[in-house]
Image: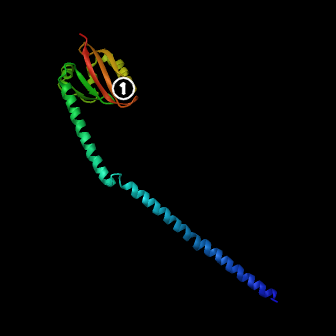
Amino acid sequence: MISSETLTVMFTGISGIAAFAVWVYKKLIKPTQQFLDDQEDIKKAIKTIESEVVTNGGSSIKDAVNSLTKTCHNIEKNQKVLDQRSKASLHYHELPLFEVDNRGRIVWYNKEFSVIYENEGELKGYDWISMIAEEEREEFIKEFISCVEMCRKLDIETVSMNGIEIHFVGYPYRVSEDNHEGFLIHLNKEN
């Protein structure tokens, strides 16, 4: 028969071996399994990225971006030509026309507008407002600002510095219901 001391030593040894086995599993085997599982996830992610980097046509994303860059450049060039063409056709229009940006600053005007404005210098910013009689200016500015902020048609009758009745009619360049990129305004003399 085995003595109680021998049994105690055996159980202590078995407990030690079991504790060591649990420690090896937690500290070595389990992290290794997790690492291998993570490796599989990484391989899948790399395959997904690789499939996204090559376009359906078989060329690379870089090729697609280069093609898109060329297309955007062509669109920009064509847009500049269209803009210049429209400005050229409006420049000699019989009505005085001018264009303001989305804050109301003048950015372009035609020959007829410069004749009516009767100022030798180049118009910039809000200079065009000085053509309105001082006593009418405050009311005009309130209505003009309202049209700019609300993205709505401008239709204001007022008096110029020379005492001539003038009528401003303008349309916003709408990019959405509430946003615009400026106005094209024409001016009618009432006298």
20 relative position to 122: left or right? right
Residue at 71%, 83% (x, y): give it.
13
Q: Amino acid at mark 1?
A: Val
Q: Position of residue 14 (x, y in %)?
A: 71, 81
Q: Position of residue 167 (x, y in %)?
A: 29, 15
Q: Quadrant of the C terminus?
A: top left
Query: Vertically, is 124 above or below 64?
Result: above
Residue at the extreme top: 191
107 relative position to 41: left or right? left
Query: Where is residue 189, by image quadrant?
Result: top left
- The residue wearing badge 1 is 148
Query: Where is residue 85, by image quadrant?
Result: top left
Q: Position of residue 82 (x, y in %)?
A: 22, 33
Residue at 43%, 60% (x, y): give it.
46
Residue situated in front as seen by the camera: 108 or 44: 44
- Residue neighbourhood size for the residue with mark 1, other residues' Cα within 10 Å, grouped as few (<14), some (14–19), many (≥20): many
